[in-house]
Image (cartoon, coloured by chain):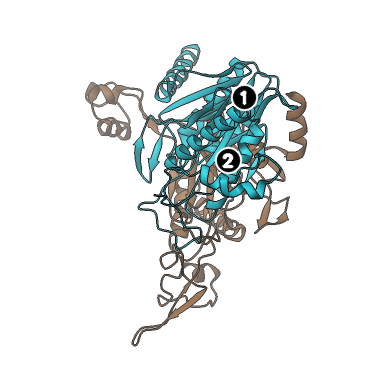
Chain colours: A brown, B cyan
Amino acid sequence: MALASVLSGECADFSLDFRQPFGHNCGPGQSGAECDAAPGDSVSFSVKNPMLAGDDDGVERKIEFLHGTTTLAFKFEHGVIVAVDSRATAGSYIASQTVKKVIEINPYLLGTMAGGAADCSFWERLLARQCRIYELRNKERISVAAASKLLANMVYQYKGMGLSMGTMVCGWDKRGPASCTGCCLKMGSLSTCQLIDEVEGAAVGLHHTPLRRQDSAWLYYVDSEGNRVCGDLFAVGSGSMYAYGVMDSGLRQDLTVDEACELGRRAIYQATFRDAYSGGQVNLYHVHSGGWTRISQEDVLMLHQKYRDQA
Amino acid sequence: MRQGVVYINTNFSSVSGFDAERDSMRTCLLSPLPSLPFVSSQPVPLPFPMAHGTTTLAFVFQGGVLAAADTRSSCSGLVACPASQKILPIHSHLVGTTSGTSADCALWKRILSRELRLYQLRNGRRLSTSGAAKLLSHMLHPFKGTELCVAATLCGWDDHTSLSGPSLFYVCSDGSRLQGTLFSVGSGSPYAYSILDQGVQWGLTVAEATSIAREAVYRATHRDAYSGNCVDVYHVTSQGWTRRTREDLKEEYYREKESRRQTHEAEKKML
């Protein structure tokens, strides 16, 4: 098992007898823990999934909002802005107002945290380890696509076992979309152009320019269901809907770095204003060609004063 | 032959001898409404799950009350009607936004209009928004615990009362009745709230307020699957309510896309 090999120690054997502990057997009308034992069958437990049983009226919500937090990230011309809140809740108790929800995987990769705090921080630290191993083996940085895929594959092995994680992997790498300056388009085939590139020289008198790899910022959303999606804009958590409204309305490609930071900050602030499970401080990061930079950490209540005075 | 009677509690009837008159109230309020059991029996399950999918919003500002809503009626995954009316005028100075089960909202709005008209005829003046909200809330109370689902905001302008001016109340079938300056109801409401919280203040002009309301509904329809199609905007002032032409948000989407494309092109040219 993956976990055992990583920890290289003995761990409990979560064998396949532990059938469908969450999700499928749950629904309104299911009591706490039921034990179904049929003759000749191994015992299976159906436990009420604490994530699904959100409401007392027993209605099973189809849309599950990831847990109390607001994290967002968006791409713009000068890189990626990552903004998160810093509140951790246990039910209605605010456990902490100063949680770090952005995990610095390495100097050019960031991961955000939403869902179970333990799951997120463990798996992202594991990811950091894997990224470092890749770097040492291959003598080059890992691409964001590969890093996010590593994470997605790692958690996919635990699908259905109750991991709760909704994270965004953001970084900058040289593995951008290969763009040919146009000659292969004239010839009608990308592969022909590549062939010429490897051969290192114009063969048969054909005009060519080598494929240029662009530097680019990348943003991937990875969650514990196994989803891995590349995109320009994501918000994760219970406050994500509030953040989407602000981001959609303010996002343009030609934002300056300061405007983009302000947009991210405002989006988190609006989410903390309406969502009870988000709050604390707004932590802001900017990912650019030189890696990531921590821009600011501002208390949401201070922002409230600031925006009220501005208005 | 009387099928049965729906007992509607009116709280503003003549104070003296209210109890004695209750029976006569009961008889005169009898109407061709379906009879309902007083004892709540097993609730009949809905034939299909109704999604309370909508985005409606309303806020108070110096120019009166502005109410906006999308126009999509959905039944689970089906868009049952892309052009429904979610803001229903109740009388000349009161509109109500609706959310929840469309049928319930439409019916109760009509009942409310009727009761308010009766009040006006009996007492020679319009009932305040606060009173209308209280009336609606008390009318819905006997149905608490049943499948009835109405979440409405009543937006009105009050005259001739001690608190005259714009007024906004949120009334819900689970019993809430709240006064406020800004409400948004429905599945798309979080998206709308963040836009409204940023921009709504008392001192807005009518044009600015309309623009914020439209933007909020547009952003909500962009992200929420159960909201969409067009946007209706109603404005209530001391002269009564006025309605803006219904606007298709698909056009707004293309306009925005086009303007973004143009700025992108202009930028590329500059570089």
Most distant residue in the bottom direction: A39
In this rendered view, identify the residue nearer to me: A50 or B9: B9
Residue A299 seen? no
Query: Crowding near pointer 1: few (<14 within 10 Å), some, many (20+)?
Result: many
**Residue at coordinates 74% horizontally, 34% vertically from top-left?**
A303
Horizontally, residue B233 falls left or right of residue A272, namely left
Task: Name the amino acid type tagged 2.
Answer: Leu
Query: Crowding near pointer 2: few (<14 within 10 Å), some, many (20+)?
Result: many
Quarter of the image for residue A190 reads: top left
Residue position for label 2: B136
Q: Above or below — where is A201 with respect to A20?
A: above
In this rendered view, identify the residue nearer to me: A304 or B13: B13
**Residue at coordinates 63% horizontally, 40% vertically from top-left?**
B134
Residue position for label 1: B65
In this rendered view, identify the residue nearer to me: A192 or B30: B30
Task: Name the amino acid type tagged 1.
Answer: Val
Asked whether the residues under marks 1 and 2 belong to the same chain, the reply is yes
First in sequence, mark 1 or 2: give its number.
Answer: 1
Horizontally, residue B248 falls left or right of residue B203, namely left
* Residue A113: percent from left, percent from top: 59, 50
Kindly identify which chain the residue marked by label 2 belongs to.
B
Q: Secondary structure at mark 1?
A: strand
Number of residue marks: 2
**Residue at coordinates 42% horizontally, 41% vertically from top-left?**
B103
* Residue A241: percent from left, percent from top: 55, 40
Quarter of the image for residue B191 reads: top right
Kindly identify which chain the residue marked by label 1 belongs to.
B
* Residue B176: percent from left, percent from top: 62, 46
Q: Secondary structure at mark 2?
A: helix
Measured Cα–Cα span from mark 1 to mark 2: 19 Å
Which one is in front in this view, the residue at disc 1 or the one at disc 2? Answer: 2
Tell me, yes or no, whether the two marked residues, 1 and 2, touch with CB atoms within 8 Å.
no
